[in-house]
Image: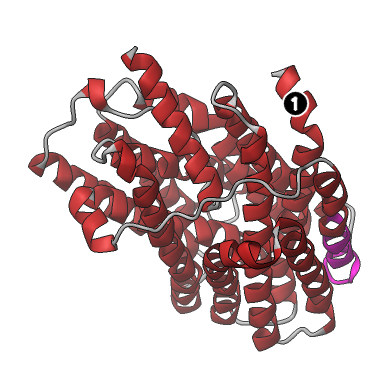
Amino acid sequence: MLAILGQIWALLFGIFLLMVGNGIHGTLIGIRGVQEDFSTLELSIIMSGYFIGFLFGSRLTPHMIMRVGHVRVFAALGSLISAALILFAQFPYPWVWFFLRVLIGVGFSGVYVVAESWLNDSSTNENRGKVLAIYISIQMFGIISAQVLFNFADTTGFLLFVIASVLVSLSFTPILLSVSPTPRLEATRPMKITQLFNVSPLGVVGAFCLGAVFSALFGMAAVYGARIEMSPSEIALFVSMIYLGGLVMQYPIGYISDRMDRRILILIVAGICTGFASIGVFTGSFFTILLVVTFVIGATTTPLYSLMIAYTNDYLDVSDMPAGASGLIFVNGMGAISGPFLVGWIMDFIGPHGFFIYISLTMALLALFCAFRMTVRQRPDPAETMSYTPISPTSTPVVVDMAQEHAIDQQSEEGE
């Protein structure tokens, strides 16, 4: 592990700075939007803008790289993010913020694709699993670390926007000085959604539901906290619990999933999330209980995304796995676009507790559909199932391809 870190520490440090900048931005927009008297529905549309841009950027970036190269794309999109972050405080209007969120979504998606391409190029068949594990941990730790800054800066001023912008700008240095400018990039054509649904209905429905829930957590958790009058430091801790839960439980759930019927595990995990989200509806201002609730929600939703990809792989030929994963990413992205808008509409209609009602209903739908699918399809042969590999719900196709390669390598080793 130390040898791997010695080879890619500068690249990982740059990625960490990117995640801190994005973590500040995600929480700050929710808090500041409430302070600017934006309605919950307006904020939900603004939050959806990021995921519109992210999905568009993940499709656009490979074409830009082929035209002008990795370094120019990384520098251009990074500069776009840095500039956009500064403009939020200067132009506090909903339509401007929505446009800026779309730009930032495009930018972050693009720089993630480039950075992850370099990360993939730095890994080998022997260490790919460890590199992925470190990368996912760095992502989560970066967002958690970002929340600490809300204890030391005023959310009504410019400082936090400036800090986020500076961190994104500084992230260029270690990344660009530690990598080759021409890593391998292979674009994967996604499988048709109808074809993917025929192969794995649960995988498609699960990917959509988890995209809708995770984007609501990422985009609207801070809005919920502000609406029930949490302080900025309390909101930061509240948001941190989501990612801390995901960081802690990725590997235990992955370990279990390789040793039982994945549908049973999906049903149990989705049911636990539904139950704790329901508790959140009635806790009101009991802050400690809310922290436990959000920890469990993060601990269930984040691993479920990796679980859905592993489950779908169980029904795909090895040659079809990259296309299937690309299709699931697209479905997840469509769910992510709808999530903030739907939860914002519910919160605007019935109040802040609509945040947890939305999560509970969405995860209950997933659990019910999983239970239904268990009645109409046999469990695949355990000897032919693919291994679980942790993936963040915000991962680009590059990391998902890395995970697929690792899963295939693991199956080959087990077969031998």
Can residue 400 be seen here? The reply is yes
On screen, residue 302 versus residue 304, left or right, reads right
Q: Position of residue 379 (x, y in %)?
A: 16, 31
Circle 1: element type:
helix
Q: Position of residue 325 (x, y in %)?
A: 39, 49
Of all residues shown, which one is farthest toward the left? 376
In the shown orientation, is residue 369 left or right of residue 134?
left
* Amino acid tagged 1: Leu
> Taking 47 as reference, is 123 above or below it?
above
Count the numbered circles shown: 1
Residue at 61% from the left image edge and 43% from the top image edge: 243
Depicted 223 relative to depicted 321: above or below:
below
Residue 56 lies, with reference to residue 248, above or below; the image says below
Q: Is residue 293 left or right of residue 269?
A: right
Nearest the eye: 230 or 54? 54
Q: Quadrant of residue 169?
A: bottom right
Instruction: Give the residue displayed 51% in from the left and 61% down from the top.
Output: 216
The part of the chain drawn in magenta is: 154-167
Majority secondary structure of the magenta segment? helix
| Residue underneath mark 1 | 5
Q: Is residue 159 magenta?
A: yes
Frontmost residue, 327 versus 373: 327
Instruction: Pick whichever, 59 or 278, lies toward us.
Output: 59
